Amino acid sequence: MADLNPTSGEIEGALDRSQNLLPRILILGGTGEGIELATRLANRKDLRTISSLAGRVREPKRPEGVVRVGGFGGVDGLASYLVKENIRMVVDATHPFAVQISRNAELACGRLGLPLIGFIRPPWVQTKADLWHEVADFREAATLVDRQKGRVFLSIGRQELGSFAVCHGTWFLIRAIEEPTGPLPDLHKTILRRGPFNLDEELQLLRDHSIDRVISKNSGGSATYTKIEAAQLLGIPVVMVKRPVKHAIVTVETLEEVILEINRLVRSN
């Protein structure tokens, strides 16, 4: 008579098969919101998530759950990955300035007929106490500050530092997580630190280096806003780089809205 009691291997195999039937969601992350979303979905029994990080930092903050690191190889590579991994929905929670991956995601999801949720955190809004000069891009920011000279705090990440290599009369305090590898301005000092930073730290930094101008991109969120708040309190002008156009689709600004869309997908599965 056949043994009706399943072995441990058979039980594990059945569990694996049931897991593979759950909707799989790809989170394009690398942001605090991407990490938070992965954390909020990690213990759900009705779906599986994969977080994708670009891999520009050697030791990124890793979200909970399954994580992949590195690029996809353009639109074709991303589309191939979505098919291979049987992804049912993509959530774009990348940085507001990470334009290329967002455009690739729109094209790949459009090609496959997959739902795409574009999450973009709200931008910072200038107050009456802020001394902002808004510019369209990093090249315009470089031209502006080099014409005015002085001592500038440059905290924009490593990817855009090359725009300031043309500056010859301005001194820059450059803050980054890892050592920059591309061209840099003639006069500079680099400090390697990972945020978030509190307000007292930012105030002390600006005072210690006699900073008279701050360059920032309008990232939004709370993680790096303290440098803007410190500049406001010290009466230091901020050259604020406007956000690029990131999506052609309708976007949402809260993780609650993202989770509502995910819940709709799960209910329809």
Image (cartoon, rainbow, N blue to C red):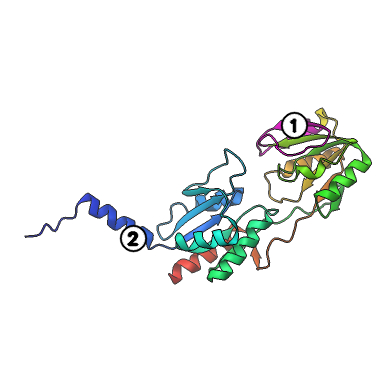
Residue 160 in view: yes
> Which portion, as a residue range, is magenta?
177-206
Task: Name the amino acid type tagged 2.
Answer: Ser
Q: Looking at the picture, does residue 157 appear above or below residue 186?
A: below
196 vs 41, left or right, is right
Residue 163 relative to residue 110: left or right: right
Res 225 quadrant in image:
top right
Horizontal arrangement in the rendering, residue 213 relative to residue 39 (left or right): right
Q: Which residue occupies the foreground of this view, 55 or 268?
A: 55
| Residue at horizontal 52 percent and vertical 46 percent from the top | 63
Is 246 situated above or below 269? above
Give x and y (percent) for residue 237.
Answer: 87, 43
- Is residue 60 shown in magenta? no
Whichever of labels 2 and 1 marks the residue nearer the N terminus, that label is 2
Check whether the beta carbons of the residues at disc 2 and disc 1 lie within 8 A of each other.
no
Say the numbered circle drawn on residue 7.
none
Q: Which percent across, then down, holds residue 83?
A: 47, 63
Quadrant of the rendered image containing residue 77: bottom right
Residue 206 pos. (x, y %): 81, 33
Quadrant position of the C terminus in the picture = bottom left
Q: Position of residue 66 (x, y in %)?
A: 46, 49
Residue where numbered disc 2 is placed: 18
Q: Quadrant of residue 61?
A: top right
**Of residues 234 and 195, the one drawn nearer to the viewer in this rendering:** 195
Residue drawn at x 60%, y 58% is 74
As measured in the structure, the alpha-carbon distance from the residue carrying label 2 to the one carrying label 1 is: 51 Å
The furthest residue to the top: 208
**What residue is pinned by disc 1?**
190
- Residue occupying the point 53% across, 69% down: 112
